[in-house]
Amino acid sequence: MATKKSNGADSDQTVKVSCRNVWKIYGEAPETFFQGGSGAVSDPTAHADKIRQSGHIVASANVSFDVHVGEIFVIMGLSGSGKSTMVRCLSRLVEPTAGEILLDGEDLLKKSPTELIDIRRHKMGMVFQSFGLLPHLNVFDNIAFPLKLQGMGLAERRDRTARVVELVGLEGREASYPRQLSGGQQQRVGIARSLAVEPELWFLDEPFSALDPLIRRQMQDEFLRIQSQLQKSIVFITHDFLEALRIADRMAIMRDGAVVQIGTPADLIINPADDYVKEFTGDVPIARVLTAETVIDKAKKPTARMPRVSADTSVETLLPQLADHKNGIAVENAAGKVIGVATAQNVVNALASEAAKRPDDEGAPA
Amino acid sequence: MMDRLDRTTQGWIVLLAATLVMLALRDKAGWLITYPADWVVPLKDVLNTAMAWFEATFGWFFRGLTAILDVPLKAVQVLLQWLPWPVTIALCAVAAHAAAGWRLVIFTVAAMFYMVLVGYWTESMNTLALVAISVPLAIFIGFVTGVAGYYFPRSERVLVTILDLLQTVPAFAYLIPIIMLFGFGPVVGLIASLIYAFPPMVRNTMLGLRSVPAEVIESGLMSGATQWQLFWQVQIPTSARQLLLGVNQTTMAALSMVIIASIIGGTADIGWEVISKVRKAEFGESLLAGIVIALMAMVMDRITAGLALKDRSEFEQAGSFAERHWYWLLAGALAIGFFAAAQVLPLLKNYPEALEFYPAEVMNDALSSFVLSSRGVIEAIKNFSFFFVMLPARIGLEQTISPYSWGFEFTTPLKLVYLALVSALVGWAWFKGKINLALTLAFFAILFFFGLTKLPWPGLLAMTTFMAWTVGGRALAIGVFLSIGFILVTGIWPQAMLSVYLCGLAVAISFGLGAALGIAGAQSDRVSAILRPINDTMQTMPLFVILIPFVMIFKIGEFTALLAIIAYAFVPAIRYTEHGLRNLPSDVIEAATCMGCTKWQLLWQVKLPLALPVIMLGLNQTILYGIAMLVIAALVGTNGLGQQVYIGLGDGDFGVGIIAGIGMAIIAMVADRLIQAWSKSRQEAFGLTAP
């Protein structure tokens, strides 16, 4: 199965941050359920049920995943599924009850408060759903705030801030205050602030959920553009499955604090782990998920007049072009080499075979 | 029918019946009406002994504190007296401009020049000196306590109760121990105003810190803030507006207490001027001095409120030194300029008496002729209210109606007519299914027949406790029972009932009036625009000043006190009613409009029921305001707890004063807790949140 970006997860398998059996329990005596802070239990589901029956709240249950260097890892789930708790465990805004979190191979949970502050100052950046801007500071001071906390001089602060202001397209708004900006602009400030320290690990907690759909779409494009330049390791939280599909290299679906399935978007759609995942994927237009690469006829030779598209183009964008070019469209890989030709018939066949895997009531999309 | 009634209704019927039985037995068992003197716990003697011991043991500490506090106080007083008046006015004008622009500058200069013009500059500056020392201290203490309360949420319950006590125990009551410990003099005013003024800062600090959004704190943490940086660079600036509102409230409280504390004398400030003139019934003089206080309060309020609501963006503009500090430079230049000018022009240094404008005599003459010419009307109003409203509520129709008051005897046939009328009304409400209305009618019928002060105390104690149980559960019921029990066993029940009667009547009238005005304000923007400045003025008006016009026209007495309380307490009723009606969920209003509600139906059947919880909080505030004014009103002749406090202060009797003071606080807090509990349960039922 192809990934959305040829330069994505596959190219670099170094692990940036790793969760090992992480639990977060709220209640009177959460730590009594674990021995020595280890989250490894023989039957996690039964263990979580036992904890719930004792009147405790299980926010995260035995969560394990790796985030690779340079990839966008999306955690998707409905509200109350524990996704926000997870991203806060990764940044230790919330202290996990049990388990391990390894950042560059070192146990984050063992870091002292001073070390933690240092890590946050240099390695982490976070974007919040309601922006989390400081109302008394203007755009410049908000973005420069983390730099100022580090004690950086004004000249260097100006320099760094100017760079990220340009990156998010906020030139000319430096003197404005948060309340004078639209939601979309406020989130650009939030993004710029989180990038100002040049973090290696970038957390985004439902960054676009508070925005209206048109702006959301635009911001997703901006986000992908910024990521294509910066290549951060990203943990992105969302409750919007389509958003997850658009941006994820790999994603985890969470439910009741536990991870249901981890995989690339296409994996999840084609091989949903259970009915819960199927419920999300069922509504997804397959054409948006399948890439050009999956529908090519490798035997067919491209002609010179055929337009060329890259391998990760979605079938959805391919369809209107196919209408104009009856003979097909040449598909090339990241290196610019043509790997095959996509024709209308190939696309129909692919869509039909995917549709056949779905429950009957969904109907075939093509 | 009984089997269909819920337990609450059954309980009320039993309690009302029991009350009637006790009233029937009152001749045989007088202890049901008058709490027996033998049962009184001699708490006041215990308190006096304890206080004497405390004073003897720790008095040196407080006297030392007095000596220490006296130094900066004297210094500021001397400084303010030494500065030529134009310098002080110019500095205040610069502050006014920084806070709210040119209009406030004009108001400030005019207000302060008035103080010069009527010849009260010296007294005003003595008051200002007290405020200048007490406000920063109160803000500091309040801020530190508030921060502690924020970081240790477990201490909150205790803290809030202490704050409630400090704000509801009448100031006069704690003037007594303060005088005993700190001796006479201006420092007493300072300490009293500190105690009274720091609680609002505590509340606003906690509120402000708590209202910082979680994400803002998290974003601060993720920016790598240490605890210290997080507090000073994230939490404090984000809650700055709430903190500055606290500063505003603290300043106003400090000023009002400085004025009240001047009743002990020896301060030579403007409050003393007003009180001594009111006591001598000199209308013109007291009003001219009263206006000084009112103006001072308004200027301080507008400047501190202006700073709180100011747009911060203009504050931190970058630029040259002169651009960034031009306010300070301007203030310095003006001060030096006027100071130099005052050396040349003596007029600017000491305003000559010959140029003063003091129209007190003219005002007195005008008032005398007004009172003379409308004596008939004034007497009629006074007598009517007294015989037909106040006396029935206090001692009941049973004792009020006589040939002298109503023009006829209250004979047995007439009593039977009353009974028949009441039964008909209660019966009508009952069979209409309005059980609560029927019970309320029955209660008030009993109240007006026998009078509040003649009702059996076991009945009232049981009814209040039962009400607490129905609205707030067991904990509230126990609290209310013990609080009212305190009033009983300390032997202040009769005075407490007099206070409840006067305050209850005033609150009922204020609330009716205020709610009606509030409804009008909510319905019409024009009415609202007229009401707003009136509300603002009445809220900043120091309590003594409100008293003046009523005393002058209606002389000393309970009726004057009633009017003064109403004048002060009707404002919150207006505010909350209007706020409640204007801030309803718009979808409900739209839905009701779409169903074809007329404006009137919309108001009565949709808006008022929904706004009721908020309006009830307005009632709560009305009660608190009423009780605050009750103490001040004791100056013009009332017989309740307010008078007891005043007596305690006059005689230096710590026990009497403090017990009466706590009694008033208990009445205020019981009313507060009952209404809050009720309002909360209603709001939750509607799915609304408190304002």
Image: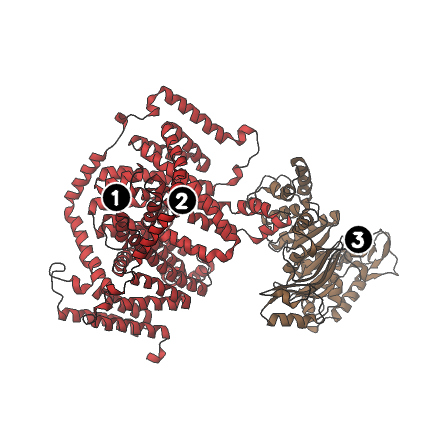
Chain colours: A brown, B red
Q: Amino acid at mark 1?
A: Ile
Chain at tag 3: A
Distance from the alpha carbon under mark 2 to that under mark 1: 39 Å
Q: Residue at x 60, y 50 (%)?
A: A131
Q: Amino acid at mark 3?
A: Asn
Which element type, helix, strand or loop, lies under badge 2?
helix
Asked which quadrant contains residue A8, the reply is bottom right
Distance from the alpha carbon under mark 2 to that under mark 3: 77 Å
Chain at tag 2: B
Distance from the alpha carbon under mark 1 to that under mark 3: 84 Å
Give the x, y percent position of residue A216: 64, 53
Which element type, helix, strand or loop, lies under badge 3?
loop
Q: Callout 2: few (<14), some (14-19), or many (20+) C-alpha neighbours within 10 Å?
A: few
Q: Nearer the viewer, residue A345 or B243?
A: B243
Mark 1 and mark 3 on one chain: no
Dot 3 corresponds to which residue?
A: A7
Q: Amino acid at mark 2?
A: Phe
Quadrant of image for the C terminus of chain B? bottom left
Query: Looking at the image, which residue sits at the far top?
Result: B344
Q: Earlier in the sequence, mark 2 or mark 1?
A: 2
Please indicate, yes or no, whether residue A246 appears anywhere in the rendered image: yes
Mark 2 and mark 3 on one chain: no
Dot 1 corresponds to which residue?
A: B548
